[in-house]
Image (cartoon, rainbow, N blue to C red):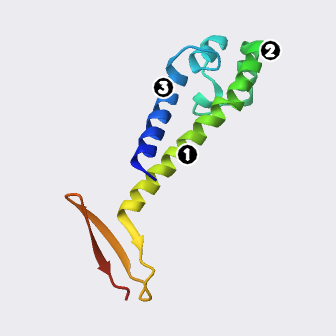
């Protein structure tokens, strides 16, 4: 995975989180909080009871509940997927630059160290 893909996913993930939570548009957090008369949405609370859910849904009314459902089936599915892609790319990028397993018959594990732009393998022996 290239550094460009990693940088693009980082920018897209942070940008999407900021846009969803700070800008005002249908299905954004500020829009939904306005529909809920300022009450925090369920996934923005540390915990909630069934009474809290009924209270929030009473405040939202029918149209607000429909908007909340669209939020759950769009934004709340896409953002975790995007975050997962970003984290996966971060792990792949880091692991590709740190460890490689040799396919030699002696099964030598090689750790690469980046030193002034050069990779120098340091073999480790198995006991």
The quarter of the picture where residue 39 lies is: top right
Neighbour tally class for label 2: few under 14, some 14-19, many 20 plus, Cα within 10 Å? few
Front of the two marks 2 and 1: 1
Tell me the quarter of the image containing the C terminus: bottom left
Q: CA distance from mark 2 to mark 3?
A: 28 Å
> Foreground residue, 20 or 92?
92
Q: Is residue 127 above or below residue 37?
A: below
Q: CA distance from mark 2 to mark 1?
A: 33 Å
Name which of mark 2 and mark 1 comes first in the sequence. Answer: 2
Name which of mark 2 and mark 3 comes first in the sequence. Answer: 3
Neighbour tally class for label 1: few under 14, some 14-19, many 20 plus, Cα within 10 Å? some
Give the structural element (helix, strand or loop) at label 1.
helix
Where residue 29 sits: x, y (%)? 58, 20
Kindly identify the residue that appears in the image at 75 percent across and 19 percent down. 65
Question: Left or right: 43 with respect to 53?
Answer: left
Where residue 85 sits: x, y (%)? 54, 46
Which residue is under mark 3?
A: 18
Where residue 10 sits: x, y (%)? 44, 39
Give the structural element (helix, strand or loop) at label 2.
helix
Name which of mark 3 and mark 1 comes first in the sequence. Answer: 3
Which residue is under mark 1?
A: 84
Kindly identify the residue that appears in the image at 46 percent across and 53 percent down. 1
Where residue 25 sits: x, y (%)? 60, 14
Which residue is under mark 2?
A: 62
């Amino acid at each position: 995975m290239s550094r460009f893909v990693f940088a693009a996913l980082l920018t897209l993930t942070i940008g999407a989180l900021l846009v969803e939570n700070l800008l005002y548009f249908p299905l954004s957090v500020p829009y939904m909080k306005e529909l809920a008369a300022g009450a925090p949405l369920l996934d923005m609370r540390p915990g909630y009871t069934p009474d809290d859910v009924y209270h929030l849904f009473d405040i939202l009314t029918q149209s607000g509940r429909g908007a909340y459902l669209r939020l759950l089936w769009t934004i709340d599915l896409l953002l975790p997927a995007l975050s997962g892609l970003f984290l996966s790319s971060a792990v792949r990028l880091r692991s590709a630059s740190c460890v490689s397993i040799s396919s030699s018959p002696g099964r030598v594990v090689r750790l690469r160290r980046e030193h002034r732009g050069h990779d120098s393998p340091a073999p480790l022996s198995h006991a």
